[in-house]
Image (spheres, helix red, strand yellow):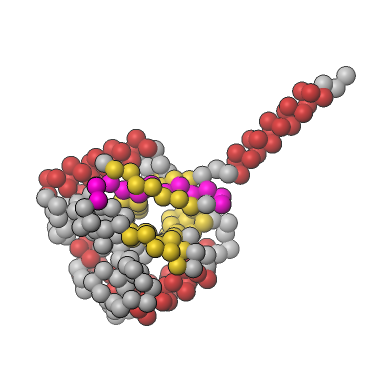
Amino acid sequence: MINYRLSISIFLLIGCLSCDQQVSTITFIQMCDPQIGMGGYEEDIIRLDQAVNKANALGTDFVIVCGDLVHHAHDSAYDDFEAAINQLKMPYLLAPGNHDLGNIPSDSALRAYRARLGKDYFVSHHEQVSMEVINTQLIKQNVPIESDRQMKWIAATLDSLSSTQQKVFVMGHYPLFTKEVNEEENYFNLPETQRTELLQLFESYGVGAYLSGHKHELLVNEHAGILLVSGETTSKNFDQRPFGFRQWTIGRQNIKHEFIPL
């Protein structure tokens, strides 16, 4: 005789397991401007160590660092940065900042960064999330050949990702804008022409969020359904917010982020 009660229970259990698989989430951490040497050299190292230890305790899927890894781009500072960041137990992604490449990046600065830290723009895949890392120094300043090459790569990469089922995020150093989408260019944002081009690309290809640093203040904006967030630092916060980082949780239907203090 068929045990209908048992059959129904098994059916419900399988259904619940399927639902759990469908609503699986991925988490990652957004660190901004560790900038060793800005807030006090030894203090910055201590706080970066604290951030790494807290990230390991949280056990997120990966970590992103939105530029200005060091205050002065010297080998000794990068040695100390890498000694801390390499203690992470999960993958990490680095974007270059203006203190890493200079406000006007030279060919020699680009070569030095790439030799030491790897590619300055690339895409990385993490289960249902793809993270496109960009070099905003090549957008803030027009570097012959390099700037045009990256913009073409950004568009082509977003186009290739549009055929996947992954959620797409972009990370860099400079915010696109700080308060208003049509604000004039200043030290803390990107030029209007390039800003408009990027926003159009992000909207066309369904980018979920653009993550940045540089401002040393918490910025949370939204444009055409795209979240734009610059988070707290581990070096110096001009808005007097506590040191820490943002933890992002990505589900099937929602994206959320929260502040994690050191």
Q: Quadrant of the C terminus?
A: top left
Residue 74, image x and y in percent? 14, 57
In percent of the image, x 31 and y 51: which residue is there? 31
Residue 214, image x and y in percent? 26, 62
The quarter of the picture where residue 94 lies is: bottom left
Residue 125, image x and y in percent? 47, 53
In percent of the image, x 57 and y 59: which residue is there? 164
Q: Is residue 138 visible?
A: no
Residue 212 appears left or right of 126:
left
The quarter of the picture where residue 141 lies is: bottom left
Q: Is residue 249 visible?
A: yes
Question: Is residue 247 inside the magenta stretch?
Answer: yes
In percent of the image, x 29 and y 77: which residue is there? 185
Residue 22 appears left or right of 169:
right
Question: Is residue 67 inside the magenta stretch?
Answer: no
In percent of the image, x 14 and y 52: which residue is there? 39
Which segment did they paint magenta? 241-253
Q: Measured along the vertical axis of the image, is residue 43 above or below residue 189? A: above
Outermost right residue: 1
Q: Measured along the vertical axis of the image, is residue 151 above or below residue 38? A: below
